[in-house]
Amino acid sequence: MRYRNSFYDHGCTEEIAEHVIDYDLWYQLHDSERGHRQVMYVGWDKQGVRLWEVGIELCSEGQDDWAFHGQEATAYSRKQVGL
């Protein structure tokens, strides 16, 4: 996975993102400007203390996906995945 500069704007780290994605709780967002599907993963950090949301642009087969957003989960994200 690659990380856009915008991913780091709210204090999320690559380690947190990888852990959040492992929870496999997500909801679909609008397609990217490039026509790729985008999803928002929601999950806990390794310590189980903070709930995070991580936005991913899912690229075509053979290309790396892009993480474009990472921050503590909003009430909207929590609701979308039932937390």
Image (spheres, rainbow, N blue to C red):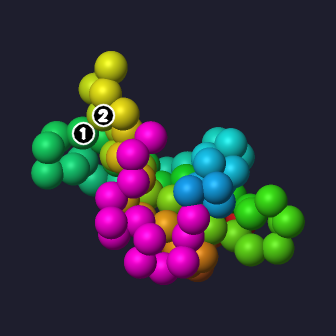
The amino acid at mark 2 is: Cys
Write the start and end of the magenta stretch as one range.
1-13
Quadrant of the frame with the C terminus: bottom right
- Disc 1 crowd, CA 10 A, few/some/many (<14, 14-19, 20+): some
The label on residue 59 is 2
Q: Residue at x 28, y 53 (%)?
A: 30
Let me know if residue 77 appears in the view: no
User: Rounded to the nearest whole Å, what is the CA distance between mark 1 and mark 2?
Assistant: 6 Å
Q: Is residue 7 above or below residue 11?
A: above
Residue 17 appears at what percent x and percent y?
A: 59, 55
Label 2: which secondary element: loop
Proximity of marks 1 and 2: CB atoms separated by less than 8 Å: yes
The amino acid at mark 1 is: His
Q: Is residue 32 above or below residue 36?
A: below
Let me know if residue 27 appears in the view: yes
Q: Residue at x 33, y 20 (%)?
A: 61
Q: Was residue 5 drawn as part of the magenta stretch in this picture?
A: yes
Q: Is residue 32 above or below residue 42?
A: above
Depth check: give the residue in front, 36 or 14.
Answer: 14
- Disc 2 crowd, CA 10 A, few/some/many (<14, 14-19, 20+): some
Residue 9 appears at what percent x and percent y?
A: 41, 78
Residue 52 appears at what percent x and percent y?
A: 62, 68
Residue 4 appears at what percent x and percent y?
A: 33, 58
Q: Residue at x 68, y 43 (%)?
A: 22
The label on residue 36 is 1
Q: Residue at x 60, y 76 (%)?
A: 72
Residue 24 left/right relative to 71? right
